[in-house]
Amino acid sequence: MLVLSIGSEIYPLVKTGGLADVMGALPGALAAEGITMRSLVPGYPAVLDAVATARPAAVTALAIDDLFGGPARVLAASPGGLPLFVLDAPHLFARPGNPYLASNGVDWPDNAQRFAALCRAGAMIARGAIGDFVPDVVHAHDWQAGLVPAYLHYDGAGAPPSVMTVHNLAYQGQFPAGLLDTLGLPAAAYAIEGVEYYGSIGFLKAGLQFADAITTVSPHYAAEIATPDGGMGLDGLIRARAAVMHGILNGLDTDTWNPATDPALAARFDIDTLAARSANKAALQARMGLDARPGTMLCGVVSRLAGQKGIDLILQTLPLLQTLDAQLAVLGSGDGAIEAGLRAGMARWPGRVAVVIGFEEPLSHLIQGGADVILVPSRFEPCGLTQLAAQHYGAIPVVSRVGGLVDTVIDANPVAVSAGVASGVQFAPVTADGLADGLRRAAALFASPPVWRAMQINAMTLDVSWAQPAKQYATLYRGLIARHGGSVTR
Ligand code: ADP
Ligand code: GLC
């Protein structure tokens, strides 16, 4: 089976969040199911750099004379073993830095054309434009790929079935209605049963409308987004499409995230050598300028600093962390006010609160391998990957009771503790008081080393790999192909 995956980020080449991790891990995970996945991604400078040195050398698989205002080509290459189609369209993607934002922090004014181009190229490949890769299924990720199912629909019969995965309903890709013609959509598409969304064109809406199947990245989030509270304006459409909606949890790439081999750790460890974590804790304290205190509860955070993530709630609990004699180490970047609040906390409690503003892959691993607790107080969380990494690395997640956090963390309620299955702490409601309650519970558990150690072992024993999710995607693809009247020959 050949599957074309389409999205705007892919680890390790370009990443702002978990979408990249999932795009990067899926091809390897699905290979174990006998599925050949190739990922179409934009030719950002970092991607083209990697492709330039790929062996065997990249080939031009498709040339397009004019793609939204300039020539483009699709390169096929597998840098670092990652099978890619790269949309090389310099007029759209030869821009350094963040994939979505200009250096002034504002969205590129032509983001509609940039990601419509990705979708248009994807739709062309879907319909057989690259002879030796005619996909059986097309899998589009998030709003940037949302027009793929729409283009396949409006271009008429003969397209393979499509899957639309929602990684985050908060980012919907809405653009002025006047762009309809520019984007190559027929006038009829501007309708409620088309791409129209509250007076504009909605890329994610289009994908949800026309995909043959919809997935989101946890069962709990699938239920939440079908409600007015969680649906961010799209719940009506999501309810209407309930029959094709699936919640499939993300996995963790356990090659990249393996505490027994992780080069970013000061000391590697596994379930039998948990004591070695203390060297990572010491290294983390030293790296972040925290007091060298082996016995204190060290709370880590690795996060985009966006409203979704509830980091402002952590700011409100900084005094409580002092009362609990805990430390805080935060790695993140994003919202200026949250960054400023964290810096103020560091100035107020030096040695106890530490912040690194930035995006640092190795430090994110050291936090997972050295912190006792990982805080994830999200207001909503489609799946979340940092609590998966935490558990795999023997750090106990303290998470809000929302979305994929509910599905992936086993709360240390008295029953779970006595049954020996607890792997973390869930708190509710998602308020500063709720988080405070979660922190107090974590501190009480931390005060009992045997209980804590048992939780660490439970957490490390959970299967957070891609093995099960990959099987679910494979089943979904096979069902779509069968319903489409097709059979898989490769
Ligand atoms: P989201 O996709 O909403 O940002 P996830 O938890 O699914 O949340 O994925 C976040 C990914 O990005 C994880 O791999 C996490 O380790 C990583 N990450 C987030 N912020 C940083 C940062 N500042 N430095 C390094 N890695 C980060
Ligand atoms: C999104 C979500 C996150 C999820 C990730 C990968 O960015 O916010 O919860 O884990 O996508 O699916």
Image (tube, rainbow, N blue to C red):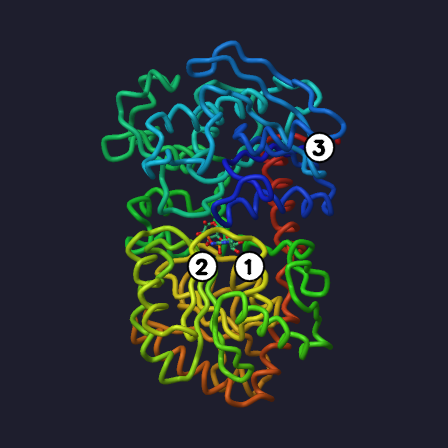
Q: Nearer the viewer, residue 332 or 193?
A: 332
Q: For the residues carrying marks 1 and 3, which lies nearer the camera in this image? A: 1
Q: CA distance from mark 1 to mark 3?
A: 43 Å
Marked residue nearer the N-terminal end (3 or 2) = 2
Number of numbered discs overlaid on the protein picture? 3
Respond yes or no on whether mark 1 lies under 8 Å from ligand 1: yes
Q: CA distance from mark 1 to mark 2?
A: 9 Å
Judged left or right of residue 90, residue 323 is left
Circles 3 and 2, Cβ within 8 Å, touching? The answer is no
The residue that label 3 is drawn on is 488
Instruction: Say what secondary structure mark 1 lies in.
Output: helix
Q: Position of residue 458 (x, y in %)?
A: 62, 76
Picture quadrant where residue 418 is located: bottom right
Circles 1 and 2, Cβ within 8 Å, touching? The answer is yes
Amino acid of disc 1: Leu
Respond yes or no on whether mark 3 lies under 8 Å from ligand 2: no
Disc 3 crowd rating (10 Å Cα; few below 14, some 14-19, many 20+) is few
Instruction: Say what secondary structure mark 3 lies in.
Output: loop
* 188 up-or-down from 345: above or below: above
Q: Position of residue 387 (x, y in %)?
A: 52, 64
The residue that label 2 is drawn on is 356
Q: Residue furthest left?
A: 199
The residue that label 1 is drawn on is 363
